Amino acid sequence: MTGTVTTSRPLVIGLDLSLTCTGVAGEGWADYIRPKTLRGHPRLNHLVDEITSFIKKADLVVIEGPSFGGGVAHRHEDLAGLRVMVRHACWRRSIPYALVPPSCRALYAAGKGSAPKGLVRDEIARRYGIELDGVGRYDMADAYTLLAMGLHHLGHQLAEVPEKNATGLTGCQWPDTEGLAA
């Protein structure tokens, strides 16, 4: 056919970073990475290597930012290090990345910035048809929300999102996306 233009969605990967169970999602799928018994540098190395295998061809990576509550003070340094290492892995590969506060992720998914993880998971199943059960279900749901936010930001919404929920996009740090596949 002459004159046919095919547009495809950019490849966006959502990452809910965690030292114990990192959620990873792309359009139509979600997975998780568990370092099991690894600690310290071996754990960080394992997580970054696994995450890199998911993001290597991405047009945009959407990363959940830090949570300043939740009793993670004893893990703060390693988790902050993981976030920096993943951002550096994106930078080395010239992959733009966005940072999304947890409250913006919850607002986008469930209409409330303090929505519990179970409600976020339920909304992902309802809105996108992605059923997430078992180990990592909440981490994968968070990652799927981040993926959906990234696509929405780029003008490729996966599904209708209530206007109130969409306000969650405004509190995020989005990269300059010029040159991304549109």
Image (cartoon, grey):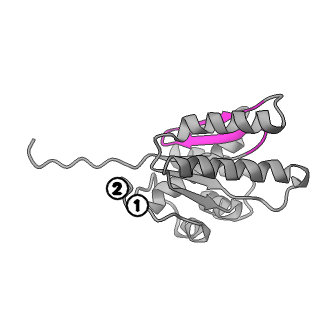
Q: SS for tag 2?
A: loop
Helix, strand or loop status at disc 1:
loop
Image point 62% across, 47% down: which residue?
15
**Image quarter of the N terminus:** top left
The segment highlighted magenta reads 18-35
> Can you identify the residue that label 1 sits on?
155
Q: Which quadrant holds residue 154?
A: bottom left
Q: Disc 2 marks which amino acid?
A: Ala
Relative side of 86 to 54, left or right: right
How many numbered tags mark residues here? 2
Q: Look at the image and tell me whether residue 122 can be seen.
A: no
Residue annotated with mark 2: 182
Q: Is residue 153 visible?
A: yes
Counting other residues with Cα less than 10 Å from the Cα at mark 1, is it few (<14), some (14-19), or many (20 or more)? few
Query: Is 140 drawn above or below residue 134 in the view shown?
Result: below
Image position of 99 with respect to 54: above or below: below
Q: Is residue 85 magenta?
A: no
Question: In what quadrant of the picture does the C terminus appear?
Answer: bottom left
- Along the line of sight, which residue is nearer the eye, 41 or 15? 41
What residue do we see at 84% from left, 53% from top?
Answer: 76
Is 81 placed above or below 54 here?
Answer: below
Q: Amino acid at mark 1?
A: Gly
The CA distance from mark 1 to mark 2 is 8 Å
**Front residue of this view, candidates 82 and 71:** 82
**Between discs 1 and 2, the one toward the N terminus:** 1
* Nearer to me, 164 or 85: 85
* Residue 42, position as x, y percentages in the image: 78, 33
**Residue 120 drawn at (x, y percent):** 67, 51
Position of residue 98 measured from the top left corner of the image (x, y, whole percent): 57, 59
Q: Is residue 31 left or right of residue 80?
A: left
Residue 141 marker: none
Q: Quadrant of residue 38?
A: top right
